[in-house]
Image (cartoon, coloured by chain):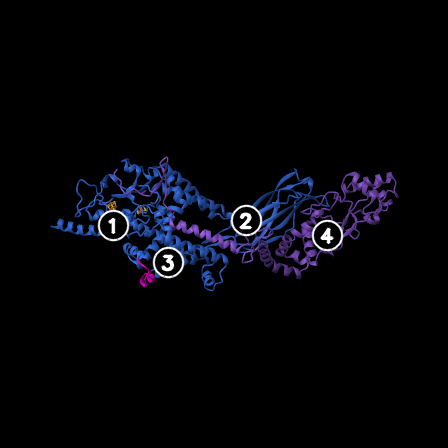
Chain colours: A purple, B blue
Amino acid sequence: MAIKNSQNQVPDTGHEWDGIRELTNPPPRWWTIAFYLSAVWVIVYLIIYPSIPLVTDHTKGVIGWTAIGEYKEAVAANDAIRKPYLDKLETMSAQDIINDPEMLNFANSSTKALFGDYCAACHGSNGQGIAGMFPVLLDDDWLYGGTVSDITTTIASGRKGNMPAHTGTLDDTQINLLTDFVIAAAAGSATQEGWDAYQAAGCFACHGADAKGNKWMGSANLTDGIWRFGSDREAVMNVIKHGVNQDGVDGTVDGVMPAFGDRLSTNDIKLLTVKVWSLGGGQSE
Amino acid sequence: MSEEKNNLENIHNIEKIYNESAEHFDVNLGGKKIHPKKVSGRFRNYKNFAWVFWIGYILLPYLRWDGQQSILFDIPKRQFHLFSITVYPQDIWMLAFLLILLAMMLFGITAIAGRVFCGYFCFQTVWTDWFVQIESWIEGNPTQRRKLDDAPWSAKKIRKKSFKYLIWILISLLTGITFAAYFTDAYQLWVDIFTLQAHLYVWVTLLAFFVGTFLFAGFMRDQVCLWLCPYARIQSVMIDKDSILPTYDVKRGEPRSKAKKGVIDSEHGDCIDCKVCVAVCPMGVDIRNSALQEGCIMCGVCIDACDDIMDKVNRPRGLIRYNSEKEIEGIDLPPVYKRPRVIIYAGISLIAIMAIVMGLLNIPPLAVTVIHERQPMYVTMSDGSIRNSYTFKILNKTPEALNVKISVEGIDGIVMKGVGEFVILKPNKMIPFSVRLEAMPDKVVDKKVPVYFTITTVDSDIKISERYENFFAKP
Ligand code: SF4
Ligand code: SF4
């Protein structure tokens, strides 16, 4: 094949390895231009942005760009999106919000952080509570009531349960009898003997004649299967013996919901009310 | 007499040819600008046909369809409008098939005819073609262009060059705006641009495409294909002995010699060494060196050019022609449909096409996800029943508000709470809502049993009734 016009009429360095020659031709012009442009860009960048670390500080750049500034801009942009909703929240009551699906959705999603900061430590991130210690917010057993106003009061003013200790006033037999009764009542199999002991010990004063509790006092409903301070026999007996929140009584059970009225704005309390209400226990007025 | 006259004409023509293209060419390593000669002919016509498609690309965003932009990639709203079809991110699996289809088509075409995508269809080729055409209208033929490039700056040169750049800039701007128009309302875009109100993203896109078009099509041209294009790097592995490539018929052409007086003597081959094939090549390739060259984009214009020369010297056409390595060796090329590569690529393409068509025809009007709340899995209620919570996320992809009813089955006496009787789904909107199921523990046969939600439209032309399975857990 008589092929002419060799396309490699380019000078080489004389190095050759496996048929590959090392050429000395310069890189393409566009490449060179792009290379110098990159160098120029580096300098421009160094001037515009904070870039050179100094001993204690760094160069600031001429346009005053900072990462925190950019972050704040992003936050401001986010706030601008939220603003119409927040403005509406201002004028709506917790009940209004619950009635408006779109606002309810906004309230619930924008309250995640608030709930996480103030509620989740005790009530769990999803309101699942901690068995025997902090109540579940997802069920319908609300010692202090589950309406919007009840929940608002609970959050704003806090709650402190009060159940007297019975070690001094009742003897062991009675306490055993009452323990059995409470456990049986929850299962729906309480005996007459149990009811008699319940009456005799005066428990009805707080828990009601039918043992269904009283939301004005926050006394527990003894006939459901939901246990505020634990469901095993020992835990039940402990509450009867040492009561709840009794000053100076050894072994008393603590159950305090702190008041958030001073720590949170009305709006935040409103939002948390909506959140807690919609967790599942909410009741209508 | 007539033959003599013919020869005389040929002498004249051939001298003209030699005069026009008497230049030395080698592979352009980036140091110079290639000024290809204009050609006309079969393959050049195919090329013209291919770029008409790109005119469509420029006009398409202005077309309205069902009251909407015919093609709109609405990124903020996460919707992609393709004529009557709206594709949501949930249906984006089709994109995978589209990409497979495009890849397979590219592979298949490359296996059949090499880098023809580059030569006929690629935007780099097409835009460069336009730019070169404009250059030749303003600055004349390649010889005149080279002269102008070398000439010192004068009023005439400045006038011509700036006029050329102006038109290039206009085309580049149009290219940028066109691209941006696929992502926003095309008419509003023009208003925004001329009132300087456009979004920063628009400016950045525009600038990138403007600069890219201007530099790549105006100045870098063949350099892009040779040095920058990623496809150029991989296509040689897709070419085999069956692929037809523009090939110079060495047996017939060599030894080449300058034709004297327009006659080719029997001692020499058919190539008259006029170098027209080189002069017309947009890549500056001398096809006579070998068939498969890194620079060659297989555009076929050298074939047109040489055919023209062969006509002039009264030799059969096809000294340069699309030819496979097998054909050169004298082996017959098997028909396209019998080549395994082609069959495989075509098969995969077919599957992808079917998947896309089926996908487009069956885009579900609702995108539903039901999430079972895991923490906690269940809660005991005061009446002893067990409650499970679920989060519903329903995206209504239809343009109308839908009234739907949600019902549940799977457990005796199961009760649904948290949603009213009807749920109104706003169009193109998703508002999650939570649903709670309650059942007595003795009716739940296992720790975990399936439950079925049914979503049915009520009072609507759009009939939807879909079942979604989830589970119910008890202690
Ligand atoms: S191959 Fe054809 S166009 Fe090229 S130099 Fe030979 S005769 Fe001229
Ligand atoms: S050699 Fe021929 S086919 Fe290849 S790029 Fe040049 S003109 Fe096109």
Distance CA(mark 2)–CA(mark 1): 68 Å
Q: Residues within 10 Å of mark 2 (few under 14, many from 20)?
A: some
In the image, the residue with mark 1 has its CB under 8 Å from the nearest atom of ligand 1: no
Instruction: Tell me the element at label 4.
Output: loop
The N terminus of chain A - image quarter: top left
Residue designated by label 3: B168
Q: Quadrant of residue B427?
A: bottom right
Residue on which disc 1 sits: B22
A160 inside magenta stretch: no
Q: Using residue B74 as the reference point, say whether residue B386 is left or right of it.
A: right
**Mark 3 belongs to chain:** B
Q: Which residue is mark 4?
A: A146
Residue drawn at x 87%, y 44% as measured from the top left: A200
**Residue A253 visible from this viewpoint:** yes
**Rendered location of residue A22, percent (x, y):** 37, 40
Q: Which residues are magenta?
A: B151-160
Within 8 Å: ligand 2 and the Cβ of disc 4?
Answer: no
Marks 3 and 1 sit apart, C-alpha to C-alpha, by 29 Å
Sequence-wise first label, 3 or 2:
3
The amino acid marked with disc number 4 is Gly
| Marks 2 and 1 on same chain | yes
Please report whichever mark, 2 or 1, sits nearer to the chain's N-terminal start: 1
- Name the mark nearer the viewer: 3 or 2: 3
Residue type, numbered disc 1: Ala
Earlier in the chain: of badge 3 and badge 1, it is 1
Q: Amino acid at mark 2?
A: Ala
- Element on which disc 3 rests: helix
The quadrant of the picture occupied by the C terminus of chain A is bottom right
In the rendered image, which residue does mark 2 sit on?
B367
* Pointer 4 and pointer 3 on the same chain: no
**Label 2's element?**
strand
Distance from the alpha carbon under mark 1 to that under mark 4: 97 Å
